[in-house]
Amino acid sequence: MSTVDAEPFSKTKSMELPRNVVVGHEAIQQVGDVCHSLKLGRRALLVADEITLKVAGDTVAALLAKRRIRAEEFLLPDATWEVVQEAKAQIRKGDLDFALGVGGGRPIDVAKCASFEAGVPFVSVPTAASHDGVVSSRASITKGKEKVSLAAHTPIAVIMDTGIIAESPFRLLAAGCGDIISNLTAVKDWALAMNLRNEYYSSYAAALSELAARLIIENAPNIKPRLEESAWSVCKALVSSGVAMSIAGSSRPASGSEHKFSHALDRVAKKPALHGEQCGVGTIMMMYLHSGNWQEVREALLAIGAPTTARALGVTDEEVIQALVHAHEINKERYTILGDQGLTLEAAERLARITKVI
């Protein structure tokens, strides 16, 4: 076909990226200046829990006040859909201009969803680096008795104070590492869906996501408790992972079969572990299915101090096997190495044993 007869180029792409990202020592001191420079308004909803309010929330409110921004507090008991609606109602009733999530997963997820529902911007101020949701447009919310991943909007600003994050429980930082390392299998699943299902694939987003995972694996021996340099490495990787999702326009670069396993384990386990911990263990097994270097993933998690076995997760062998069997049922439209039929009971047990998870 000649160039004259070719179809005209009509490809378009929309990306929602954070406008301001501040990472580093005493970064929290810039929260007032950032919100002021972005002209977000004079009235904000500050979402936190009792612990994170003391750790950083009170400081954020004082810094906003210096910039003549009044913050209304919203203390949450849990990240449920009902709580999201309460926060949304407070934003609308007070005619508030934007919301800030100050804390770990729950305050940030609630603030993200409530602000999205209310149609106002959202600022992310994490006190822990336990998962990539602190930078992404996805939120994990409990609806009924089940955790669901909801679409929201990307934070307009992200302020990550490495000093505060380094002082958070190390288990949270290690879980964040597991969530980032899981990008390796998520990207492989994405490429598989492109080849077998002709799914849209962004090589740029995939490369950025994989780069974040490699950053953690290469630095694994140096990620230690109460070390601000460790928090710095994890925060940088979380930002890269979040930006990759923004470029892709979905969570594809950072969520694949290993996340399906984690969500399935949430359903079947009496007491599930942290999301990032489960994703890390899932990555070991899914990397084996992809014929990749699953030993490298396992060794990196061990070096960090993250779980690699069912016992370390605090779940039973049977719960892991059942999660593997049912993982393909999660988010069915997302094609992964698990396929449409999933694993048999025998294949699931064999996989968990070969990879030393059980």
Image (spheres, helix red, strand yellow):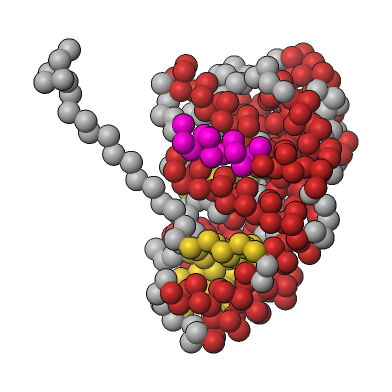
Seen in the picture, residue 134 relative to 255 is either above or below; the reply is below
Q: Is residue 27 visible?
A: yes
Identify which residue is drawn at 75% across, 31% down: 297
Residue 209 located within the stretch drawn in magenta: yes
What secondary structure predominates along the stretch shown in magenta? helix
In percent of width and height, residue 207 lies at 53, 35
Measured from the top left, where is residue 230 in percent x and y? 75, 54
Residue at the (74%, 14%) spot, across then down: 347
The residue located at (40%, 74%) in the rendering is 39
> Is 233 rendered above or below residue 200?
below
Callout count: 0
Q: Quadrant of residue 48?
A: bottom right
Residue lying farthest right? 311
Rendering coords of residue 102 (x, y %) = 62, 67
Magenta stretch contains residue 136:
no
- In the image shown, does 24 or 154 lie closer to the viewer? 24
Q: Which residues are magenta?
A: 203-214
Q: Visible in this render: residue 85?
A: no
Relative side of 283 to 189, left or right = right
Q: Residue at x 82, y 60 (%)?
A: 226
Give the vertical position of 351 relative to 309 (above or below): above
The residue lying toward the viewer, choosing from 224 and 128, is 224
Horizontal side of 23 relative to 153 (left or right) equals: right
Residue occupying the far left of the picture: 4
Pinpoint residue 343: horizontal percent, then vertical percent.
68, 17
> Where, quadrant-wise, is the C terminus in this rendering?
top right
